[in-house]
Image (cartoon, grey):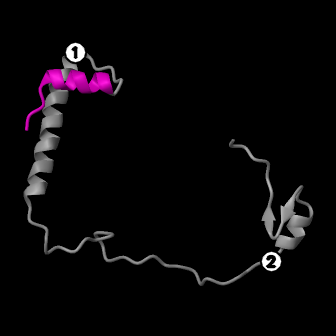
Amino acid sequence: MSISPDEVLKIANLARLQIKQEEVEQYANDLSSIINLVEQMNAVDTKDILPMAHPLDATQRLREDKVTENDQRDTFQTIAPSAEKGLYLVPKVIE
């Protein structure tokens, strides 16, 4: 698929982009190349390929999930302007 210079100008107008007239042809060529690459990738049969989360078989080192602080919710809620049943009450902002 090929993008024409007129289509580039129309897309630029819709996207509110200002493109210099001398650059329009280069943008048309670049966008056409990108679309052709996507069409090539779509043509590849991938039905037997499992999706990957990462190209490398890497695992993230995680720290042990343990509690390091005491629960101080009740202490903090005693100084809150308004709290009820463990929740902070705030003024309604959406009508």
Which residue lies at the image location 30% right of the left edge and 21% below the top edge? 13
- CA gap, disc 1 and disc 2: 64 Å
Q: Which residues are magenta?
A: 1-14
The residue lying at 80 percent from left, 57 percent from top is 89
| Picture coordinates of residue 17, whole percent (x, y) | 34, 24
Q: Residue at the location (28% across, 69% down)?
A: 55
Q: Nearer the viewer, residue 62 or 15?
A: 15
User: In the rendered view of the protein, which quadrant contains the N terminus?
Assistant: top left
Vertical relation: 8 (above or below) 64:
above
| Image quarter hosting the C terminus | top right
Density class for disc 2 (Cα within 10 Å; few <14, some 14-19, many ≥20) is few
Are there few (<14), some (14-19), or many (20+) residues within 10 Å of tag 1?
few
Say if the magenta span includes residue 4: yes
| Circle number at residue 21 | 1
Residue at numbered disc 2 = 71
Earlier in the chain: of badge 1 and badge 2, it is 1
Q: Are marks 1 and 2 in contact (CB under 8 Å)?
A: no
